[in-house]
Image: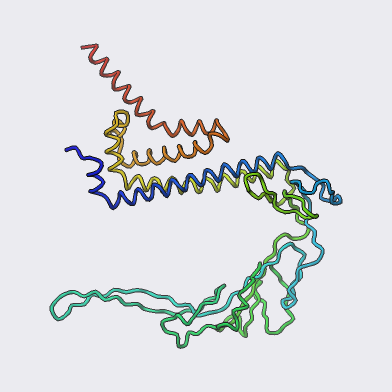
């Protein structure tokens, strides 16, 4: 019995609707990702063509004002970053502090029970068990929302200020204050490191950009400092890499990182389209059976293979559309790959026609 597309949609309207929603989500994700990738690559190429290398040890040259420049050399800072309360002093670009408080944490475990009432019917009852444990947390947990608040109170407003501006450094000096204890690189504000109480605080430090480390930077020179460079596409270019790298090496690394990020989102987009095609398998197969060219593919391959072929073709078609202008050869290759299932089906159809022709001719 021949089933129309409308009838098939009515039969599986729930999965079909989900499939259509997923299809447009995957379509949007791939379109946005490819457009972003093309614009980013174009911006990097524009920056690469405009950048000039200057000597970091020379005096600031006014003629490079507003230009995209490349410099490299060791990090130097005028004054050390300090935390007097903890006896920390380090010459670095960035000092970050992480503050944690020992607090009550509520854990909820849902449970379902089935009881028999007086009539003999089953009644389902939902219940929850609450457990309370103490842990070190970065943010203040509001104990006023606990189910059992008595005996599980966390500090309130008076200590909230200790949880702002945590920025990262490491120090190994012993603090002079007696109420601060150093253990395993962590500073504890408590009486007993091994048996902390609720409300006790611990602080950990990290640093970045230690003096003397060699770095390479690309950015715009403005008023004696390096700031982001705005390309014609609206992208901000401000690159920093560890080590002494040339302009070519820095942009090669940046393109590599951009490709990795693009492929992650591509994989997510293809996965969403594949999930969409799985939901729409029956509709896709029905449409393919009505096509002379695609019928052989629908008959010879399983539903999952057809779904994967369709999702991959749509993905490659979107990629090729985005790249065809910027990199024609890449766009053309992706376009050919997108149509490969249709080319395969056409070749199978031609092969079948030739076999039939030969059979008729031999008879």
Instruction: Please give the count of numbered marks on the rendered protein.
Output: 0
Residue ranking furthest to the top: 362
Q: In this image, 185 relative to 358: left or right?
A: right
Using the image, determine if residue 69 lies above or below residue 170.
above
Q: Position of residue 128 (x, y in %)?
A: 35, 77
Q: Is residue 140 left or right of residue 186?
A: left
Tell me the quadrant of the picture where the C terminus can be found. Answer: top left
Query: Which picture quadrant has residue 212?
Result: bottom right
In percent of the image, x 47 and y 79: which residue is there?
133
Above or below 113: residue 362: above
Residue found 53% across the figure and 79% down from its top: 103
Q: Residue at x 22, y 44 (%)?
A: 7
Q: Is residue 100 above or below residue 288?
A: below
Figure quadrant of residue 116: bottom left
Furthest toward the left, the residue is: 119
The residue positioned farthest toward the bottom in the image shown: 150
Residue at image point 30% right, 48% down: 16
Quarter of the rendering occupied by the N terminus: top left
Q: Quadrant of residue 317?
A: top left
Residue 215 pos. (x, y %): 74, 52
Instruction: Locate residue 289, reporting x and y percent.
Output: 27, 34
The colour style of the image is rainbow
Q: Position of residue 71 (x, y in %)?
A: 77, 48
Is 296 or 194 nearer to us in this picture? 296
């Amino acid at each position: 019995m021949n089933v129309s597309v409308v009838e098939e949609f009515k039969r599986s309207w729930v999965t079909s609707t989900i499939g259509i929603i997923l299809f447009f989500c995957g379509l949007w994700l791939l379109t946005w990702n490819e457009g972003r990738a093309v614009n980013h690559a174009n911006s990097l190429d524009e920056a690469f063509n405009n950048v000039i290398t200057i000597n970091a040890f020379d005096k600031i040259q006014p003629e490079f004002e507003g230009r995209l420049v490349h410099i490299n050399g060791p990090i130097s800072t005028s004054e050390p970053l300090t935390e007097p309360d903890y006896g920390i002093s380090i010459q670095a670009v960035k000092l970050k502090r992480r503050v944690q408080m020992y607090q009550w944490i509520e854990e909820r475990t849902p449970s379902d029970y089935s009881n028999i009432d007086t009539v003999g019917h089953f009644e389902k009852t939902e219940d929850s068990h609450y457990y309370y444990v103490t842990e070190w947390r970065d943010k203040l947990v509001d104990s006023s929302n606990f189910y059992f608040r008595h005996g599980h109170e966390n500090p309130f407003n008076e200590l909230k200020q200790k949880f702002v501006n945590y920025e990262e450094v490491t120090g190994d000096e012993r603090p002079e204050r007696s109420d601060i204890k150093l253990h395993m690189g962590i500073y504890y504000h408590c009486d007993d490191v091994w048996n902390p109480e609720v409300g006790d605080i611990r602080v950990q430090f990290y640093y970045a950009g230690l003096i003397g480390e060699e770095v390479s930077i690309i950015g715009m020179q403005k008023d004696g400092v390096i700031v982001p460079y705005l390309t014609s596409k609206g992208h901000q270019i401000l690159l920093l890499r560890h080590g002494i790298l040339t302009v070519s090496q820095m942009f090669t690394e940046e393109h590599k990182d951009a490709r990795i990020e693009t492929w992650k989102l591509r994989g997510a987009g293809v996965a969403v389209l594949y999930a969409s095609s799985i939901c729409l398998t029956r509709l896709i197969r029905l449409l393919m059976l009505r096509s002379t060219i695609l019928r052989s593919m629908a008959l010879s391959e399983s539903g999952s293979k057809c779904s994967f072929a369709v999702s991959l073709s749509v993905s490659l078609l979107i990629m090729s559309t985005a790249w065809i202008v910027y990199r024609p050869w890449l766009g053309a290759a992706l376009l050919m790959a997108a149509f490969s299932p249709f080319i395969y089906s056409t070749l199978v159809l031609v092969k079948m026609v030739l076999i039939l022709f030969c059979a008729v001719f031999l008879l």
